[in-house]
């Protein structure tokens, strides 16, 4: 586990370096202070091609093979381009590093990774939006904890990932409870370290995805671990891609062609929970059917708005929240959205999934 920053060490510098940033090596350290307008410089505004050129290929993130499974079960067929690789990657910091390395062209994340990428000086844009209305995360305590509410977080060690959805859920929950950052101890980790940190007692609290909680509680609830639900919502589920990909007319057309597959796959999953529970949670995640059903009951109805106005407002609030804590510099998030793709997802799904 990484050690905590020494007193007086700049929090932004420590957390950014912890999350695997390679900006210095790439000569990009000065980009962290660039504005959204600077980041948007050179971004293509050319109309999207109506047809994907032959031979076009995209490398697409598919954490735990969820995309392929959705497409197969929903019988969506193959997209009109070559998938150069389904990359088993999901965490925001890992996605950013894969973007930088050129090993990934398109990813599915929450709203915070694009903000983190901008802060690191890496140019990427959001191309599709799915709005979530119900919480996807809860707070899990370490075994033997006496914590019963978010108000009890004062003075406690909290697992915090600056570049992931779990991080913004935690910050929004603290703000709602009236707790300042200096009233808690934020322990910088990435989400794949949260369970180990809880089990070992390195942290008192960690935000866990709804689907992670059943297995953790099954093992540690008898030892005093518990789950604290929150009504804090991580609003955005999105697709995003590096500007270098979107500036390539053929790849941009492929991205546009992929968006309906992504949207329809989520609609199918929502409409067929029994099949998804069995095929994904039971067969690939080793959960019981009862555990799978408890997760599906908490799932969000997909919502692909024709307008991105609400998403942009929420993204700005998130960026401002991070800036208040000194984690990023304040900037206008409008430059994170490539409006050429706005409305594509909405047009691909029935009306009840647009509002």
Image: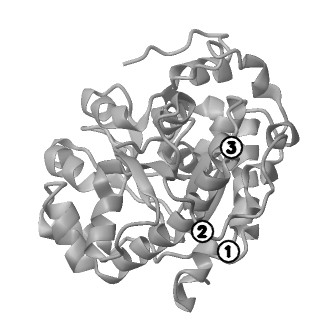
Q: In this view, does 41 lie to the left or right of 304?
A: right
Give the mark nearer the N terminus: 2 vs 1.
2
Residue ID at (14%, 63%)? 282
Which quadrant of the view contains residue 171? top right
Q: Residue 75 in the image: x percent, y percent?
A: 30, 77
Give the mark nearer the N terminus: 1 vs 3.
3
Viewer-proximal residue, 344 or 269?
A: 344
Specify few, some or many for label 1: CA neighbours under 10 Å numbering under 14, 14-19, or 20 or more: some
Q: Name the residue under label 2.
A: 51
Q: Nearer the viewer, mark 2 or mark 1?
A: 2
Q: Which of marks 1 and 3 is in front?
A: 3
Q: Mark 3 points at which residue?
A: 243
Relative to 111, does residue 264 appear above or below in the rendering? below
Which quarter of the rendered picture does the N terminus lie within?
A: top left
Q: Which residue lies furthest to the bottom in this view?
A: 351
Pointer 2 with pointer 1, Cβ within 8 A: no
Q: Is residue 7 left or right of residue 154?
A: right
Relative to 190, does residue 291 appear above or below in the rendering? below
Viewer-proximal residue, 327 or 175?
A: 327
Compute the Cα span from label 2 to label 1: 17 Å
Residue ID at (53%, 45%)? 105
Q: Residue 35 carries which label?
A: none
Q: Name the residue under label 1.
A: 343
Which quadrant of the view contains residue 331? top right
Can I make out residue 136 in this image? Answer: yes
Pointer 2 with pointer 3, Cβ within 8 A: no
Compute the Cα span from label 2 to label 3: 20 Å
């Amino acid at each position: 586990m990484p050690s905590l920053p020494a007193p007086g060490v700049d929090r932004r510098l420590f957390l950014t370096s912890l999350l695997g940033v390679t900006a210095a090596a790439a000569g990009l350290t000065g980009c962290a202070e660039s504005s959204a307008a600077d980041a948007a410089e050179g971004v293509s505004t050319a109309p999207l091609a109506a047809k994907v050129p032959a031979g076009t290929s995209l490398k697409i993130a598919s954490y735990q093979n969820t995309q392929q499974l959705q497409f197969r079960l929903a019988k969506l067929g193959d997209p009109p381009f070559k998938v150069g690789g389904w990359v088993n990657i999901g965490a925001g910091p890992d996605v950013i590093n894969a973007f930088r390395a050129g090993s990934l062209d398109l990813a599915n994340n929450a709203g915070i990774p694009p903000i983190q990428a901008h802060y690191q000086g890496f140019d990427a844009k959001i191309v599709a939006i799915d709005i979530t209305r119900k919480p996807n995360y809860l707070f899990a305590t370490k075994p033997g904890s006496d914590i019963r509410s978010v108000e009890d977080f004062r003075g406690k060690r909290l697992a915090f990932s600056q570049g992931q959805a779990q991080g913004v859920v935690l910050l929004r929950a603290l703000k709602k409870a009236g707790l300042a950052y200096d009233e808690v101890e934020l322990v910088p980790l990435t989400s794949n370290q949260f369970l180990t940190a809880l089990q070992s007692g390195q942290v008192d609290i960690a935000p866990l995805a709804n689907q992670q909680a059943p297995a953790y509680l099954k093992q540690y609830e008898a030892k005093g671990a518990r789950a604290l639900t929150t009504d804090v919502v991580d609003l955005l589920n999105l697709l995003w891609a590096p500007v270098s990909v979107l500036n390539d007319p053929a790849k941009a057309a492929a991205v546009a062609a992929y968006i309906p597959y992504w949207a329809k796959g989520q609609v199918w999953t929502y409409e067929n929970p029994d099949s998804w529970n069995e095929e994904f949670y039971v067969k690939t995640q080793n959960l019981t059917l009862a555990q799978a059903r408890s997760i599906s009951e908490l799932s969000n109805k997909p919502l692909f708005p024709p307008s991105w106005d609400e998403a942009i407002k929420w993204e700005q609030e998130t960026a401002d929240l991070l800036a208040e804590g000194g984690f990023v510099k304040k900037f206008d998030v409008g430059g994170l959205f490539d409006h050429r793709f706005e409305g594509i997802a909405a047009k691909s799904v029935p009306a009840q999934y647009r509002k």
